[in-house]
Image: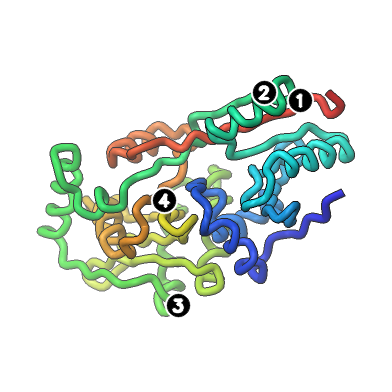
């Protein structure tokens, strides 16, 4: 049996040594997200055959595993995970199965897995430069929003830091009340994760920004690297009464991120119609399909 260890702040160096060099762009593989959402996912990890294996608590009560990360033999680790699931008498769920990995699994295990994906949980991947510059016909509406904001408001931009975190938490609290925090479980969970992240801002290696109008916060955002060329924008909050605040914080932040971040992952839309429309309006270069390989029978 594999001995899995709960993921905590002290594991950052070891876990990111596997994740940052990888090509994976999945927002769930951001170390900041792994820690911040631990209260729901019960994320844990182990090093198996020189590969990093991360697992979450599945909604059914069992576990699901991310595809192993590292330079070892993938198939040998999958074999071990098959035995682990059988020993625990539960189905085996493998997350993050790309089309290429699916072909490989189908080659080695032609009848063992079935594959499922859910559009509501696909990540939106953008070119950072596109969001920073807003060039071309496709981005004309966004340029108009940003230009209107700049014309109508006297604003300032500051990096998110320990000095303004408490003010951001207060802003987020007010945002939650306006958006039905009491009735909406998703917002309540997001608030808990966001609060944890901001309370451990430095330890998680977060980067963020705050937008002010006449000295008052109207928007803030933050995130963390997923790999060396992909930055995950994990949170973005703005005052909807300030026209263009969302567009402005998005563009200002993207334009200040280091150029080594070619891609921005702005996470999923959860099937929320308005959120899907907003994310599509920024013209992602791809939707990251999150396919699960599922071994239904524990003993099949």
For the residues labelled 1 and 3, the Cα–Cα distance comes to: 47 Å
- Could you tell me which quadrant the C terminus lies in? top right
Image mark for residue 296: 1
In-image side of 273 versus 241 (left or right):
right
For the residues labelled 4 and 1, the Cα–Cα distance comes to: 42 Å
Q: Of callouts 3 and 2, which one flags the residue occurring earlier in the amino acid sequence?
A: 2
Do residues under tags 4 and 1 come within 8 Å of each other at their CB atoms?
Answer: no
Which secondary structure, mark 1?
loop
Residue 178 position within the rendered picture, expressed as x and y whole percent measured from the top left: 41, 50
Q: Of callouts 4 and 1, which one flags the residue occurring earlier in the amino acid sequence?
A: 4
Do residues under tags 3 and 2 come within 8 Å of each other at their CB atoms?
Answer: no
Q: Residues within 10 Å of mark 3 (few under 14, many from 20)?
A: few
Which secondary structure, mark 4?
helix
Residue 35 position within the rendered picture, expressed as x and y whole percent measured from the top left: 62, 60
Q: Of callouts 3 and 4, which one flags the residue occurring earlier in the amino acid sequence?
A: 3
Residue labelled with disc 3: 162
Image mark for residue 178: 4
For the residues labelled 4 and 2, the Cα–Cα distance comes to: 42 Å
Q: Nearer the viewer, mark 4 or mark 1?
A: 1
Q: Residue at x 83, y 42 (%)?
A: 84
For the residues labelled 3 and 4, the Cα–Cα distance comes to: 25 Å
* Residue 233 visible, this orientation: no
Residue labelled with disc 2: 114
In-image side of 169 versus 264 (left or right):
right
């Amino acid at each position: 049996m594999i001995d899995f260890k709960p993921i905590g702040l002290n594991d950052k160096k070891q876990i990111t040594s596997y994740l940052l060099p990888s090509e994976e762009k999945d927002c769930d593989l951001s170390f900041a997200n792994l820690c911040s959402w631990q209260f729901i996912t019960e994320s844990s990890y182990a090093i198996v055959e020189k590969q990093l294996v991360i697992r979450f608590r599945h909604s059914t009560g069992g576990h699901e595993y991310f595809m192993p990360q590292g330079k070892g033999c993938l198939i040998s680790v999958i074999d071990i995970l098959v035995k682990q699931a059988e020993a625990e008498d539960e189905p085996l769920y493998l997350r993050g199965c790309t089309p290429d990995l699916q072909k490989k699994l189908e080659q080695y295990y032609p009848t063992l897995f079935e594959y499922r994906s859910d559009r509501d949980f696909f990540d939106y991947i953008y070119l950072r430069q596109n969001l920073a510059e807003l060039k071309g016909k496709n981005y004309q509406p966004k340029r108009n929003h940003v230009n209107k904001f700049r014309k109508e408001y006297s604003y300032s931009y500051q990096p998110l830091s320990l000095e303004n975190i408490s003010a951001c938490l207060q802003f987020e609290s007010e945002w939650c009340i306006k958006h039905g925090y009491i009735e909406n479980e998703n917002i309540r969970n997001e608030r808990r994760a966001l609060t944890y992240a901001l309370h451990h801002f430095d330890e998680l290696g977060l980067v963020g920004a705050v937008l002010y109008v006449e000295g008052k916060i109207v928007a803030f955002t933050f995130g963390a690297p997923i790999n060396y060329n992909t930055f995950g924008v994990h949170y973005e909050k703005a005052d909807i009464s300030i026209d263009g605040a969302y567009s402005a914080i998005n563009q200002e932040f993207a334009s200040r991120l280091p150029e080594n971040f070619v891609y921005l992952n702005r996470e999923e839309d959860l099937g929320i119609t308005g959120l899907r429309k907003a994310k599509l309006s920024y013209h992602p270069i791809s939707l990251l399909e999150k396919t699960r390989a599922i071994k239904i029978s524990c003993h099949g």
